[in-house]
Image: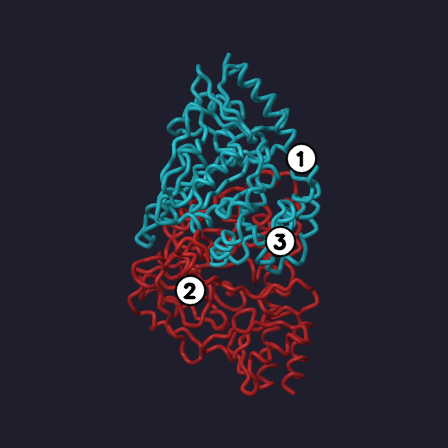
Chain colours: A cyan, B red
Amino acid sequence: MSRFWSQRVHQLTPYVPGEQPKVDNLIKLNTNESPYPPSPKVLEAISAQVNDKLRLYPDPNSDALKQSLAHYYQLETNQVFVGNGSDEVLAHIFMGLLKQDKPILFPDITYSFYPVYCGLYDVEYQTVPLNEEFAIQPADYQIDNGGIIFPNPNAPTGRLLPLQAIEQILQGNPNSVVVVDEAYIDFGGESAAQLIHRYPNLLVVQTFSKSRALAGLRVGFALGHPDLIEALERVKNSFNSYPLDRLAVAGAVAAMEDESYFEASCDKIIATRNRLTEFLQQQGFQVIPSAANFVFASHPDKAAADIAQALRERAIIVRYFNKPRIDEYLRITIGTDAETDALCQALMEILA
Amino acid sequence: MSRFWSQRVHQLTPYVPGEQPKVDNLIKLNTNESPYPPSPKVLEAISAQVNDKLRLYPDPNSDALKQSLAHYYQLETNQVFVGNGSDEVLAHIFMGLLKQDKPILFPDITYSFYPVYCGLYDVEYQTVPLNEEFAIQPADYQIDNGGIIFPNPNAPTGRLLPLQAIEQILQGNPNSVVVVDEAYIDFGGESAAQLIHRYPNLLVVQTFSKSRALAGLRVGFALGHPDLIEALERVKNSFNSYPLDRLAVAGAVAAMEDESYFEASCDKIIATRNRLTEFLQQQGFQVIPSAANFVFASHPDKAAADIAQALRERAIIVRYFNKPRIDEYLRITIGTDAETDALCQALMEILA
């Protein structure tokens, strides 16, 4: 607290990211990173750019990456926005598109950065409760609003909303921007990107941090109508001309190009998720059906916080949210097969 | 223009960065990059991090880099803030410290991103004219204000304000944050960082893009009292948890460690600046005394815009600002010796 702070700073409640431990001997299942490394072609592409040209600014528009994404999603480059991780992209969305006279809507259980952005930019919001099964109900979003945002699959539940339900929300809100935050879409969902040509109010957000295994490189993007993208470009160009460095662009382009590696990684993660889900259910856990690279699970006999603590004592870290409605759940990132075996073994001991 | 934009987006006038041409055969003297590559140790340190760990998030606090900077400037780590280029750091400063009830002050001729940040965050400002020699007059900053910011050396003039004058501004404004933007300080100035322990209202901003030859990596930082740094951390943690990627941190740490390479590069640039200044004066240019890696020069007989165009026809690009008071000046980045020779040759032809 300081007399030099602007008024807004006093009011902020910053986001708290999952722990990033500085020791190596942990099984880290707490921040939904990929258990598999980035494609070797990504590492090659980055290495090729570690050269004297780092003295020069990058392309302020990251055109190479926009072209790669536009090609992949069959869009034009003016339908693509890129940023320094999808968190930066989301921040610009809150300032440029979701700051309106009416409150915006998002689920009561969702990515906990959304209310933080609202605090940063003074955006009014109203939360919409998920139903008893933690599902988004499209009909609940038929109320007056200044915009709508939700992850699909939702976080931290992993539950997927089918495209048909997203269309229902889009059609019911033609005067609102509807942001579908698809950080986890590649693990079993269908991207709403294919709806962009039909809905000028749809903005899709994705990240390279999960399915592309590049959390350490910081690249995210948004796809939508050129008018929505232009709003984000205007904010970005009033904030930081060069958000993506030369190495990040090179790595992200290579990641988009190596489709077979990407698909193989996603398939392995999905297979492990199915195996883990089955195991957890056998152990008595209630597991929310997940289309993400994590599962959200609760045990009727043992408190989630206690299980998390017991796992930590065995050098396994998972994420626990001490929040209403979800304080009996653990969010467990899908690890490698060996990590999953160790997790299952530890859980059997803890529940025994 | 779109009905989906927030009100603020309609009002923005985004910053226009200097051209980043996509062809290689140009002598690029327009965006104040270093003509010399980063230290070989920087490239080694980055290369060592191009590995499977890119799947993991970076340290959200970039502690390794904060420690390196704190050590270099003899500060504590809670006196150091880091960001994705100094432009991002400046953006957070405008939101977190310079958005006050009273207008902030900055020179009429200065870094043209400052009024853009004011537009983004609705910060009121008042410009203070430089004197006839383009110098900041500390006495002019003795008026009621919500904060003060200026580059030292100033941009695009290159003119240095001595530390004594900065202290005069600090002492005259104990209730205002005074931000000294030292992007070019290593080319002949003395950093105000040494004043931090005496002035709780002083914030110093620097970048790795100029003297550290890492414009392509995007790293900047701020130094100041822990209370000022905390304001920036609160904004950062409400915006993007992980602004610096793994490779940027590794490269920046290595750059701080290789002091002899850094000093040798700065010395070469200063020597070339002195030689170019002498040449320009011989050709009749008026050259503002520069403590930066560029010179700001005007010719009495030939319009600056015409010279810039004639240079471009010879594959040399410099920066021309079509703005009041400076529309007869060119800002010329200091290049290598060979680039400077080519520039001098071209100017002789153009002026002949």
Q: Which residue is mark 1?
A: A263
Q: Is residue B342 above or below residue B241?
A: below
Number of residues whose C-alpha sits closer than 10 Å to that of mark 1, classed few (under 14), some (14–19) or many (20 or more): some
Which chain does the residue under circle 2 lie in?
A: B
- Return the residue at label 3: A246
Q: Is residue B199 visible?
A: no
State the SS at label 1. helix
Which residue extends farthest top? Answer: A352
Q: Residue at x 33, y 47 (%)?
A: A10
Could you tell me which residue is drawn at 52 percent across and 25 percent down? Answer: A289
Q: Using the image, name the chain to which the residue with label 3 belongs.
A: A
x then y, percent, for residue B95: 39, 54
| Other-residue count near label 3 (Cα within 10 Å), few / some / many at <14 / 14–19 / ≥20 | many
Q: Which residue is mark 2?
A: B115
Q: Is residue A167 above or below residue A224?
A: above
Q: Quadrant of residue B219?
A: bottom right
Q: Chain of mark 1?
A: A
**Residue A228: x %, y % from top left:** 49, 51
Q: Residue B151 in the image: state x and y as whole percent.
A: 45, 66
The amino acid type of the residue labelled 2 equals Pro
Q: Please state which amino acid type lies under the numbered disc 1.
A: Glu
Q: Are marks 2 and 1 on the same chain?
A: no
Q: Please report the residue visible at 51 percent of the width from the left and 77 percent of the height from the top.
A: B289
Q: CA distance from mark 3 to mark 1?
A: 26 Å
Query: Are labels 2 and 3 on one chain?
Result: no
Three-letter amino acid code at the position of disc 3: Arg
